[in-house]
Image (tube, rainbow, N blue to C red):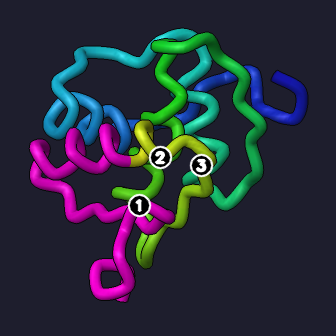
Amino acid sequence: MPGMTATIPDISPALHILQSVFGYDEFRDEQAAIIDQVINGGDALVLMPTGGGKSLCYQIPALLRDGVAVVVSPLIALMQDQVAALRQYGVRAAYLNSSLNPAEAA
């Protein structure tokens, strides 16, 4: 990927989250480099097929960095599915979209 380093730096905290929270043994393809880029405050445009592991590229940095992560997605069903899955892993997560009534949105 242009702008990303060719060598993968020590990503042990990210790998630990991958294994302990999500239950995967190792990263796929470019996930490690993308996650490192984002953890270090860089931008990343990630194009992967459905099921390619894009979600982990923002979920893991969100768990490793301080503060709140905001993910913008136009797919309501995807928001609901991902929040439900994160909650099953014990991660505090929520979504805000037009399917919520005003009280829920507040």
Q: Quadrant of the N terminus?
A: top right
Position of 59 relative to 5 (above/below): below
Q: Residue 52: say if magenta.
A: no
Element under disc 1: loop
On residue 76, which mark appears?
A: 2
Q: Nearer the viewer, mark 3 or mark 1?
A: 1
Q: Mark 3 = which residue?
A: 73
Image spot of residue 95 (x, y percent): 39, 62
Q: Are marks 1 and 2 in contact (CB under 8 Å)?
A: yes
3 or 1: tag closer to the N-terminus? 3
Q: Are marks 3 and 1 in contact (CB under 8 Å)?
A: no
Answer with left or right where residue 16 lies relative to residue 97: left
On residue 99, which mark appears?
A: 1
Q: Range of the magenta residues?
A: 80-106
- The amino acid type found where label 3 is placed reads Ser
Position of 44 relative to 65 (above/below): above
1 or 2: tag closer to the N-terminus? 2
Residue visible at 47% across and 35% down in the picture: 55
Q: Are marks 2 and 3 in contact (CB under 8 Å)?
A: no
Cα separation between marks 3 and 1: 14 Å
On residue 85, which mark appears?
A: none
Q: Residue 82: say if magenta.
A: yes
Element under disc 3: loop
Q: Nearer the viewer, mark 1 or mark 2?
A: 1
Classed neighbour count for the residue bearing mark 1: other residues with Cα under 10 Å, few (<14), some (14–19), many (≥20): few
Position of 25 relative to 55 (above/below): above
